[in-house]
Image (tube, rainbow, N blue to C red):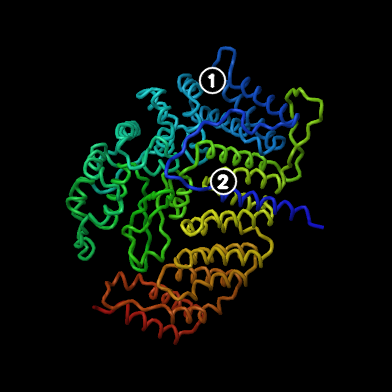
Amino acid sequence: MIKTTTVRCLALCTALCLAVLAATPSTAFAQSRPDSRRGQAKDPVQSALDEAIRAELKRLVWTDEGQLTPAGFGTALREVDALQQQAAWYIEESNTDLFRELSRTERLLRLMVEGRQTQNSDLWSMLVEHPELADAVAFTLQPGRDQLGDAMLVLDSLRRQFGAERLAAYANLTAAICAVHDQPRSAPGRNPTASASPNEIWAYYVRYEDRMALGVKSMPADLLAHVVDTTASVAEMQWAMERYGRDPQVGNRYAEISYDDNALNEGQSKRIDAEQYTLQNIRRVGGVCSEQAYFAAHVGKAMGVPTVEVSSIGSTMAHAWLGFLRVRGRQAVWDFESGRYDEYKKYVGSYRDPLAGREQPEGHVAILSQIVGTTPEQIQVAVAMHDAAAALAEFEENSDAPTIALKLDVEQSVAPVRVADDAGISELLTAAFKSTGAERRIWDLAGRLARDRRIAGDDLEAIFAFLERLCGRNEASYFATTAPQLLWALEDSRVQARMYDRVARAVRNVPGQEAEVRFLQGDGFRDREMYQEAMNAYLLPTKYRNLDGPWTVEAVDRITALLNTTGKMQHLPDLLADIFRRVPRPSTEGSFAQRRGSVWAQVGERYHRSLVLNGRTNEAQNVRRQLDTIVRVVP
């Protein structure tokens, strides 16, 4: 007999496979307005629940006067929260439109309450009277990530200057600006210019919308975030548009900036430091890699192209390059090649995410190429089912179902269609993935639930396989940073090891990222006190053909910490001796800082210290002589 879990896993795999097949990118950013009752269940009990919940939503949101009072917002939010929890237990996952309506209402109420706008009746009226704008704002802004109070101040400022009708016509642009500019942004450099305000940015993109390389009117908000996060002034953006508007090849802009060799080789101040930090001046006097990346990225943003400035620390110094969304025919992909020298192709680049407000690996933005071609409805349904899964996961696994207090016009008894176990949570997550797998908030939630052991092993394997197929070769970096979050809680260590091997193979051409996968694997074993397995994972990056990278030093540090934890520090010198022997020595022609900061010197210093701590004085003196010969030599 086939076990129930196996049957459920097969069903989950089938659903996720169909989701991958449906996720075909398009050149156009699609727009559609869903039928308000599409997906409504035909079952009498489900139909009765649907009608009762919709009626309750209408009652909670509207008073007899047609407007919520300030005190009413808090009450309505609490009751809609309760309805959302009930739906997570009682509503079939096929009724995506009801889940979407619940999520939309809950999010709008939360924006008003946590955004401290409950007395702003004009703002609330704008949202309820312009559903496209309300949808864009509600499903883009994320509680816990965005500063809702500041974001809503931006929205209200836009409303006052441009009016509700114009904001609604550019709903995604409006939402993206609110999400990105919930915190002040300023240009870099010693003499920065005054950056454009959120209102000025909105006006600029509306004015030049017909000249944008990619239309901002229908571009998804998560992509637009990498357009409107500009720190340039309006004058700079206009200059870039007039100069480069007919040439959408953003990648060519990087090499256009002359390199300030004196700043690199002689340690002098950059010429741009004596100028105002503008795009025009950077092009005139040049700069180093950070200016090249900044210039290319901000010219791209001025033309409506999503861009990021990517950076990484190499074996001896840091470097910055450009990432931008390239659209060709039916394919969209993030291009990270402009300014990325061969040496840095083995490192994981990072960028500052304008939504999260922190550094993220480059794969985090690369997956957004998959969102090209999705409709607003698909994104909203994905977020709504994410919210439903999160609501169900708030209950303990053996909890009783919440009571339905609504009056239902149906004779049959009402029973939950799912419970708060791994099967119920996976069912709702699958519905989110089926809508679009490119919504990163779903993967973040799946990772948290996996770590909390709220998703079963069979379901984790199916979700892992879906992520692997979704990312393919183009988004392997996102696969490598996201998949390990799903694997930590797998009980079967052999299955877990095979899946980590698949993740590592996906990025085998990027040793820095392959090593990061192994570090995460080792950390998982260490946290479960499986110390030998953790050691095996930490040792793998030290066996790479290419050891001249920061991953080697990080591997040494993890190995050292693990041996210290297990009381086996006497084994450290012999392990480090083998690694030190295989790390390439730096050239004596490099600068003192480069030689001292080389991987060989860093590993050597750690090797020397381990010998001293273990009382192996003669060997320690020999290693010191080797280090001094290379590091302290005068070229």
Determine which residue is flagged by label 2.
Answer: 442
Tag 2, which secondary structure? helix
The outermost residue toward the bottom is 618
**Residue 595 on image: x %, y %:** 32, 73
**Residue 356 on image: x %, y %:** 46, 45
Can you say which quadrant of the picture contains the N terminus? bottom right
Question: Does 102 sit above or below residue 219?
Answer: above
Count how many numbered circles sit on residues in the image: 2
- As measured in the structure, the alpha-carbon distance from the residue carrying label 2 to the one carrying label 1 is 32 Å
Tag 1, which secondary structure? helix
Q: At x 32% / y 35%, what residue is drawn?
A: 210
Q: Quadrant of residue 383?
A: top right
Label 2 crowd bin: few (<14), some (14–19), many (20+), radius 10 Å: many
Q: At x 47% / y 81%, what residue is drawn?
A: 577
**Residue 572 on image: x %, y %:** 53, 77
Q: Is residue 329 left or right of residue 266?
A: right
Q: Is residue 294 left or right of residue 261?
A: right
Q: At x 45% / y 77%, what residue is drawn?
A: 607
Q: Quadrant of residue 157?
A: top left
Can you say which quadrant of the picture contains the C terminus? bottom left
Determine which residue is flagged by label 1.
Answer: 70
**Which amino acid type is shown beneath numbered disc 1?**
Pro
The residue nearer to you, when weighing 501 against 393, is: 501
**Which amino acid type is shown beneath numbered disc 2?**
Ile
